[in-house]
Amino acid sequence: MIKFTKMHGLGNDYVYINAIEQKIENESELAKYVSDRHFGVGSDGLILICKSDVADFRMRMFNSDGSEAEMCGNGIRCVGKFVYDKGLTNKTEVTIETLAGIKTLVFNIKNGKVETVRVDMGEPILNPEQIPVNSNENPVKNLKLNAYDKQFIFSCVSMGNPHAITVVEDAKNFDVEKYGKVLEIADVFPNRTNVEFVEIIDEEHIKMRVWERGAGETLACGTGACATAVACNLNGLTNNHVFIDLLRRKIRNRVE
């Protein structure tokens, strides 16, 4: 018997387990089981909330295919709400250890519950070796890849996990599944990659769909939204403030 909580950030849904008070084994297989939308709980993956020797808590995040990822922006916000609302902390600012480093969360409390969470995602990584992506360009802004009948030009950014961002004409009607599953595993990405398909509306507004590494297309991706904002600004396509539409879920990003 395992106690769990189902939560989502902008529709990016995960099963959350308090692994401080429960012993969890075979995490990868458990992630695949609970993520199944027909025979399991149904989610984009599994997130474990664990003890940490270097931060207030530690987050482990597993994709629906069982692979462990470095970081999840929407997931870590839900971790923040989980630890406060369930009484694991009374702090309104906490640190969370992840495979992408220690992240700081700040809570907005209303009527004794967390209403919103702000996360310091840290500086984007542009060095190709650290992303990682096999490219001699630094930063990587003109990576050309072919998939089926199309050629894509990618910019690559890491927010602790790898992202490849490309501009398309019509994000809403783009076949994300067809191309995403091929581009995710392209040879130039040693650890695979998340793929963002972006439509530029104007200098302050873009639309984005995401193919997440190990999970497929999801309704939202926090690290992906940050990586996209960085890539679009880096290429002179947007200003420092940008609205991102993720399948009708709006995010305001700021690049500094």
Image: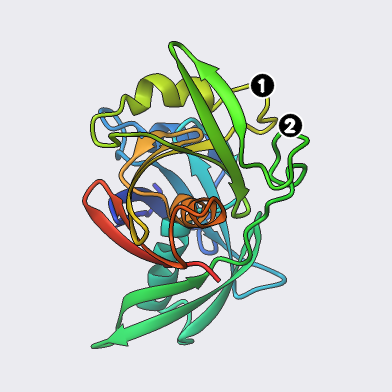
In this rendering, is residue 124 above or below 147? below
Residue visible at 35% across and 83% down in the picture:
108
The residue that disc 2 covers is: 134
- Residue 83, percent across and down? 44, 72
Q: Residues within 10 Å of mark 2 (few under 14, many from 20)?
A: some
To which quarter of the image does residue 33 belong? top left
Q: Residues within 10 Å of mark 1 (few under 14, many from 20)?
A: few
SS of the residue at dot 2? Answer: loop
Residue visible at 57% across and 23% down in the picture:
145
Tell me the amino acid under the disc marked 1.
Asp
Quadrant including the C terminus: bottom right
Image-based side of 241 in relation to 194, left or right: left
SS of the residue at dot 1? Answer: loop
Residue visible at 59% across and 55% down in the picture:
159
Image-based side of 87 in relation to 153, left or right: left
Q: Which mark is residue 187?
A: 1
Any part of residue 197 in sight: yes
Residue closer to the observer: 57 or 141: 141
Tell me the amino acid under the disc marked 2.
Asn
